[in-house]
Image: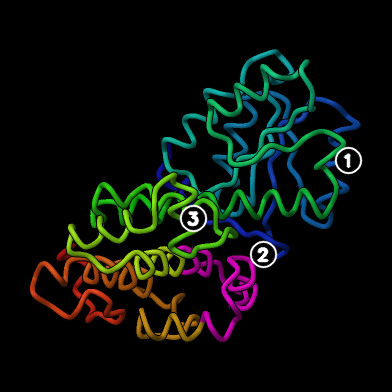
């Protein structure tokens, strides 16, 4: 799988010039409905998995998302392609397109097994607002996977479930009590796990996770800070800016600068290990940056 498939896509209406969606849709009425829902964003329609692979190879730098049926025009499953894309870490939202109801349970199961980021139900979700929102959530899922992959090695094993939940449910209540409840444990259990691992308390780790997710989403040029802050449900754009300054030592708009994202991940690793090195108290938010090469 080409490494360049990890290209970043646009979302939530922030379509850059040349950006388009690739859709494997076999029905003319469905294709027309999707094209209308995404207008003015261009859609490249394909009918076979071979055409799909060729289109992704050609357009991946500017691909905003993939909308795929479970089988192509020849009856070939799209699942192997989806699985390969997910395993390669492709930063392209992948949406499975099917109908609701028991008759389509096999398609839904296959999509779930393959790992699509979102399901789009025919004549339900293929309206302009809903389809755009699905692509947005798919992009967030891609960013969440990237964050988790980069911080897992610096996160105690017992806390990775908490991180995974926070990243993949960005609009849920992220108080320690609510996160613990979602994980089926008591709040005090999370606190104890952090204390035993000698890392910052859970509230601090949760905030770090959310900030890194926001940093990933801000990598697309032109994406407003306010939009990211609102979509991830920070208290306000001002609160988001304050947290960035407190934890990362920089303004959100500067997270797009060369090296800023790597420095943010380095800051997280530094915060998680400072207690083990006899550093600042566990609830300290601001940590000195360590060189990326040391990670």
Residue 153 in the figure: left or right of residue 253? left
**Residue for badge 1:** 33
Few, some or many residues within 10 Å of mark 2 (<14, 14–19, 20+): some
Residue closer to the observer: 36 or 226 = 226
Region in magenta: 213-240
Q: Secondary structure at mark 2?
A: loop
What residue lies at 34% left-to-right and 72% top-to-bottom? 264
Residue 17 in the figure: left or right of residue 2? right
> Residue 57 in the image: x percent, y percent?
54, 40
Q: Secondary structure at mark 3?
A: helix
Few, some or many residues within 10 Å of mark 3 (<14, 14–19, 20+): many
What residue lies at 67% left-to-right and 56% top-to-bottom? 19
Residue 136 in the figure: left or right of residue 102? left
What residue lies at 27% left-to-right and 76% top-to-bottom? 283
To which quarter of the image does residue 66 belong? Answer: top right
Q: Which numbered circle lies on residue 143? A: 3
For the N terminus, the quadrant is: top left
Cα distance in 3D space between marks 1 and 3? 28 Å
Q: Which numbered circle lies on residue 283? A: none
- Vertical position of residue 182 compared to residue 170: above or below: above
Q: Who comes first in sequence, dot 2 or dot 1?
A: 2
To which quarter of the image does residue 71 belong? Answer: top right
């Amino acid at each position: 799988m080409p490494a360049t498939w990890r290209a970043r896509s646009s979302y939530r209406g922030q379509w850059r010039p040349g950006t388009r969606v690739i859709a494997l849709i076999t029905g003319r009425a469905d294709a027309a409905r999707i094209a209308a829902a995404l207008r003015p964003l261009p859609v490249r329609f394909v009918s076979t998995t071979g055409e799909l692979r060729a289109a992704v190879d050609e357009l991946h730098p500017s691909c905003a998302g993939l909308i795929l049926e479970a089988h192509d025009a020849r009856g070939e499953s799209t699942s192997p392609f989806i699985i390969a894309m997910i395993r390669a870490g492709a930063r392209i939202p992948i949406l499975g397109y099917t109908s609701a109801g028991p008759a389509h349970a096999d398609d839904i199961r296959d999509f779930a097994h393959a790992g699509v980021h979102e399901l789009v139900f025919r004549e339900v979700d293929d309206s302009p607002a809903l389809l755009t929102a699905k692509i947005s959530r798919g992009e967030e899922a891609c960013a969440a996977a990237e964050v988790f992959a980069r911080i897992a090695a610096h996160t105690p094993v017992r806390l990775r479930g908490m991180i995974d939940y926070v990243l993949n449910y960005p609009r849920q209540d992220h108080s320690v009590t609510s996160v613990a409840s979602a994980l089926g444990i008591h709040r005090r259990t999370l606190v104890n796990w952090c204390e035993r691992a000698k890392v910052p308390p859970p509230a601090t780790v949760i905030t770090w996770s959310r900030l890194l997710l926001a940093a990933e989403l801000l990598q697309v040029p032109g994406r407003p800070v306010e939009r990211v802050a609102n979509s991830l449900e920070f208290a306000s754009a001002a609160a988001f800016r304050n947290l960035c300054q407190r934890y990362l030592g920089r303004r959100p708009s500067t997270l797009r600068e060369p090296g800023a994202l790597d420095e943010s991940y380095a800051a997280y690793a530094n915060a998680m290990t400072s207690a083990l090195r006899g550093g600042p108290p566990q609830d300290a938010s601001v940590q000195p940056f360590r060189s990326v090469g040391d990670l």
